[in-house]
Image: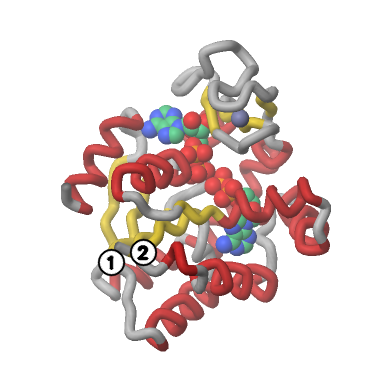
Amino acid sequence: MKIIMLGAPGAGKGTQAEMIAEKYDLPHISTGDIFRANIKAGTELGNKAKAYMDKGQLVPDSLTIDLVMDRLSQPDCDGGYILDGFPRTIPQAVSLTKALRDRGETLDYAINVHVPDERIVSRMSGRRACSGCGQTYHMVFAPPKTEGICNKCGSELFLRDDDKPETVKKRLAVYHNQTQPLIEYYGKQRILRTVDGTKDMEDVFQDITNILGA
Ligand code: ADP
Ligand code: ADP
Ligand code: ZN
């Protein structure tokens, strides 16, 4: 099964993608995680990406598309995958469609996690990320067992720079301009499924599994 996740920053794409990956045994490919890993490792790609991410802008398509195509050509993607945070622009979506078509493949589902803007800023200010393994928490909705410490690896949690309210507002504007048109794009391909992302995480996941099947 090949799935992409659509939705505003903070809608819960990563949270749901991780649960889907586990249940359906698919690799979870998050472009945000790949960029952050590159930043941490101090690679050239990381340095370039950071300048855009810090400003709440998208990393240019020229840097993003090849990176994802390369990842999708690795053997663990042969049985399908879940793409979280890609595509985010029409050129990215068109590149993905073409790459799949060249291999005689298509996407199965574009899952759109819908959350209205007014909920996003408060949700993001409570998000915490693990400095060690990248696991995501929420101070209210998904707190760690020990405050400020990752359940999985024991490292400290932090507020992402780009999750501060000023940057979140910019990212939302970028989302509406550049990413929201994908809803129509995948609607036309007849693979769009929209779920209500304001529900509890488990309920959103239930709605998604109803779509994907047992
Ligand atoms: P969120 O899901 O909260 O929006 P991500 O971790 O997916 O956050 O992305 C963080 C940042 O990484 C984005 O704001 C953007 O700068 C960059 N990024 C991630 N995916 C893409 C992409 N497909 N195209 C361009 N930039 C991206
Ligand atoms: P995205 O990948 O779309 O940016 P995340 O999955 O990182 O979003 O979720 C953003 C924040 O909201 C995280 O702190 C996460 O724990 C929390 N969260 C995710 N889904 C829900 C939900 N259904 N209800 C409340 N909080 C949620
Ligand atoms: Zn951790």
Disc 2 crowd rating (10 Å Cα; few below 14, some 14-19, many 20+) is some
| Residue at image location 16% in from the left, 47% down from the top | 214
Do the CB atoms of the residues marked 1 and 2 lie less than 8 Å apart? Answer: yes
Q: Is residue 104 above or below residue 81?
A: below
Does residue 54 appear in the picture of this structure? Answer: yes
Q: Residue furthest bottom?
A: 102
Give SS at disc 1: loop
Q: CA distance from mark 1 to mark 2?
A: 10 Å
Q: Quadrant of the N terminus?
A: bottom left
Q: Position of residue 200 (x, y in %)?
A: 33, 28
Q: Residue furthest top?
A: 146
The residue under label 1 is which amino acid type? Asp
Q: Position of residue 3 (x, y in %)?
A: 35, 60
Give the residue at mark 1.
Answer: 108
State which quadrant residue 148 falls in.
Answer: top right
State which quadrant residue 26 falls in.
Answer: bottom left
